[in-house]
Image (cartoon, rainbow, N blue to C red):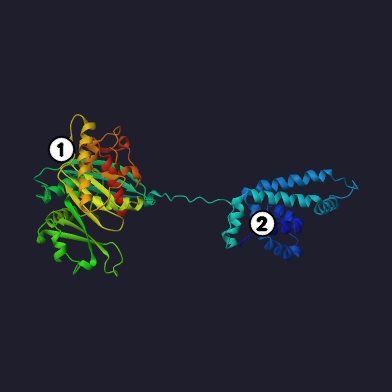
Amino acid sequence: MKIDKLFLHKYFKKNLDKIANLLKSSLVSPKKKVNPKKVKSLSKTKKKFSLINKISKSEKYQNIIEKFSQFKKDELKKQKPKNKNSSKKQTRASLISNFSKSKIKYKFTNYYLSIIAKKESFIKTFNKLKLFKNFNLKPSKKEKVSNKKFDQKIGVIFYGDHNLIFISLILNLNNNIKIEGITEIPIPGNVIGDSVIEDTNELANIVLDSINLLELNTSPLLVVLSSSFFNIHTFQASDLKQISQTDSKIQSKSPYLPVNTLVDFLRMSDPKISNSLIRTIYSKKEFINGWTNTLEIIDLPIIGIVPASPNIFDSITEKVIEETTVLIDIESASTTVLIGSKLAELASHKLPFGSSLYLSNDLENSSIEYFDRAMNSIKLILKDKDKKLPSNIFVMGSGLDKLIRRDLSLPNGFKSISELKLTEFSYTPKSMKIHELISNSIDSKLYSLSTILSLCV
């Protein structure tokens, strides 16, 4: 429904007396008595001018009513009544009649319309109206729902580089994350080896101790495993006989023996399209089974067991448009490189070096040497795939915290995922009851884990 200025001008000019009475009556207490004979006519008038009543009740336009009243009083003072002894009723009737017939009517109409003309938001609101019951002159602000009763406490477990990190956090209705407690524990090789869990019971005891310490006894858990435990490849559905790990082409890309391979499939496009893409994530079955057996002993609700980097990669491609996207996950002994694009081909590559090989007292020089080698390796991979180097290579992982300081920026061509603002979380170590770390910094890890959690719940 569109209301233009010409319509309003004619409307106010024609019905000014009624409008004046309605504007005044809208401010009168509902207890005021009304002549029964006038009830019928008043109801019709109120129905006809329901829109004006709504305007008069708005706080935003109380100043207009006040100015109009004052304007009317000032003009009435200029009028000299013929009979000073006449009754108040006669004087009021005479003055209002004179007012309605004078130029004041036109002046007020123009004044009112000028206010409307200046208030573009007011006109826009009218133009957008579909039903009067939805009419609201005050601009509405979408308030975030906040109710601690619905806050969910969640535990996140991250394993990589022979360290277990436990995080206690609160997730509210607005998906805001508040980290409440952290503990980091080194895991000896006799509990978790390089690619297999050696002692499930001992691992369960370690996890339970941390769960009790962080008061996560009834909270659901998300388990995130470092990227080095997974391999990623993408197939055309038309190239596969069946979407199963028994397919010969799928088996050919596994770094493990077929009997010890666990494959997770993700269709990247419409299943009805024969040439749709199928993302495959390979992991060592024995290693994953060790974690599932451990979680069965713990006996808490599980959100899932997920690899670190694929979720972050998909989140980056939602925000950054590049023909080719490159993400590296730096760990202590290795570096995982992910190369692909949004909802398209994605493949992982292992570089046989990590942060530990380059650490020295001269951290700035160490960082330069590591990223120079990483850049050269990535260029070789891209050349082999006939792909161009993107404007930025995105970086995550525990090794990133070891290679840089807060006052030391990344070399040109590299960008930390924290700069993308993929998620927001609050982290104030000084206010935490439990904040026990063996690493100097886990900022990069906290950012990636918060992002993964926000994508999984």
Q: Which residue appears at 32% of the width and 40% of the height?
A: 427
Indicate the amino acid at tag 2. Asn
Residue 299 in the figure: left or right of residue 322: left
Q: Nearer the viewer, mark 1 or mark 2?
A: 1
Which residue is the site of mark 1?
357
Tags 1 and 2 touching, CB below 8 Å:
no
Query: Which quadrant is the C terminus positioned in?
Result: bottom left
Q: Nearer the viewer, residue 59 or 229?
A: 229
- Residue 227 position, x and y percent, is 20, 49
Residue 261 coordinates in the image, percent (x, y): 13, 59
Looking at the image, which is closer to me, 160 or 250? 250
Q: Amino acid under label 1?
A: Leu
Sequence-first tag of 1 and 2:
2
| Residue 211 is at least partly visible in this image | no
The quadrant where residue 369 appears: top left
Q: Quadrant of residue 299?
A: bottom left
Residue position marked by numbered label 2 in the rendering: 53
Q: Is residue 45 left or right of residue 278?
A: right
Q: Position of residue 78 (x, y in %)?
A: 84, 43
Residue 445: image tag: none
Residue name at image x 57 percent, y 51 percent: 138
Q: Nearer the viewer, residue 296 or 166?
A: 166
**Residue 170 showing in the rendered view:** yes
In the displayed structure, 177 sits above or below 259; it is above
Neighbour class for label 1 at 10 Å: few (<14), some, many (≥20)? few
Give the quadrant of the N terminus.
Answer: bottom right
Dot 2 lies on which element?
helix
